[in-house]
Image: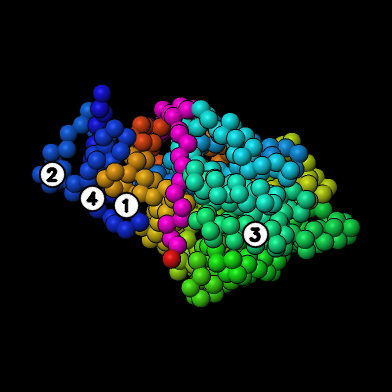
Amino acid sequence: MSSRTVIRGGLVITASDEIHADVLIEDGRIAALAATGTPAAGALTADRVIDATGKYVIPGGVDAHTHMELPFGGTFASDTFETGTRAAAWGGTTTIVDFAVQSVGHTLREGLDTWHAKAEGQCAIDYAFHMIVSDVNQETLKEMDLLVEEGVTSFKQFMAYPGVFYSDDGQILRAMQRSAENGGLIMMHAENGIAIDVLVEQALARGETDPRHHGEVRKALLEAEATHRAIRLAQVAGAPLYVVHVSAMEAVAELARARDEGLNVFGETCPQYLFLSTDNLAEPDFEGAKYVCSTPLRPKEHQAKLWQGLRTNDLQVVSTDHCPFCFAGQKELGRGDFSKIPNGLPGVENRMDLLHQAVVDGHLSRRRWIEIACATPARMFGLYPKKGTIAPGADADIVIYDPHAEQVMSAETHHMNVDYSAYEGKRTTGRVETVLSRGVPVITEREYTGHAGHGVYTPRSTCQYLN
């Protein structure tokens, strides 16, 4: 039985176009678009009609940086693949790319199999995986080739977290050389973790134990230094580089310089760096612990440079780095020692709305909103044009978005499995109304109609931006 849906009367917004058009969906894919009110639109017939008059019709968001069920600091991220993907759908995101983790002493395959087992049958929306490489050796390098062949085409390395995820420059160079050969993309957490550990130790010795010191020891200069070093190592290896969660203006400057030199270097930032600051880390009574993440929140003056980077395309993607830990019982592990606060913020449900607020505030155009949240992450990680756009042949991952509805973000009303909101009390304009994943309604007029297991694993091709 074939099923057909028509979405009528909305303003279809993609990264390249805005057009009042009706959209025909057939068997989970977009079959046709026709300008509203034309004979062609009148000829689109369907079993189900969705009225999008006065609304935006946008591609489902692609969040290329999430951590569901991530083990960290003796605990686990509080969202499972079930709760996290459901919350993502509520926020208008229809694809996540999560991180499978290789533990030191284990193979990439073991890590990937573990993450497949966590996610399979649990997800409300489609998902894919990057691979965290924690142990670079000859066997790991061979495995990278095999993973690229089967659709895991990006590998994350850490210049931070010595003793856990950390890779030294030699290990990074070897992995980059391999990715230059196999077409993979190295994603880098760029912070000088060795130097940061010295500053952490010194701060604690001085009795500086509060959450705000987390931001003070993870200095912007050490993010910029690591970003510069990662860029030059990638240049030596002849490999592309994607720097995750860029938070500091000095790091943006390093990316801009590399791109001006014609290097295949890309940068991602996250809503927390655009909307929050060290003011939040300094909140009294240990409330600042809610905002501990790495890279850390920066002083407010960094925000303007991040917005500028998004406008000039020196930053290409906004992902969430969604890695939630409850305040009670998890963030509290760091009372009396900021270095023991689990690093991470909840945000997978808030990203599309916060970026729409940026459109309302004049930071971004509507098409740029879709570009940085849907199309570019899909292209960057080999999911386009299946994901990230509204065009014939694409998966029918579509959001009906009410640009005029107002909401107040709050832990009371969000759907993430965490006991606080990083944006508590923030008023925003714009709200998700209906979400289709491969043509199936997951959110229907502000009601959850999806289910665990609808989302399928999606292998990826290689990065579509390489010269």
How far, Cα to Cα, is label 1 from label 3? 42 Å
- First-in-chain label (4 vs 1): 1
Q: What colouring method underlies this structural image?
A: rainbow
State the quadrant of the C terminus.
Answer: bottom left
Q: Is residue 296 left or right of residue 313?
A: right
- First-in-chain label (3 vs 4): 4
Q: Residue shown at 69%/58% (left/top)?
A: 171
Residue 215 location (% of width, % of height): 71, 59
Nearer mark to the viewer, of 3 and 4: 3
Residue 144 location (% of width, % of height): 58, 49
Circle 3: residue type? Arg
Quick one: label 3, few (<14), some, or many (20+) residues within 10 Å?
Answer: some
How far, Cα to Cα, is label 2 from label 4? 13 Å
Q: Are marks 4 and 1 in contact (CB under 8 Å)?
A: no
Q: Are marks 3 and 4 in contact (CB under 8 Å)?
A: no
- First-in-chain label (1 vs 3): 1
Residue sitting at the far right: 205
How far, Cα to Cα, is label 3 from label 4? 50 Å
Judge whether residue 450 is colored magenta. Answer: yes
Q: Residue shown at 45%/33% (left/top)?
A: 455
Q: Which residue is mark 1?
A: 13
Q: Which residue is mark 4?
A: 20
Q: Which residue is mark 3?
A: 174
- First-in-chain label (3 vs 2): 2
Residue 282 visible here: no
Quick one: label 1, few (<14), some, or many (20+) residues within 10 Å?
Answer: many
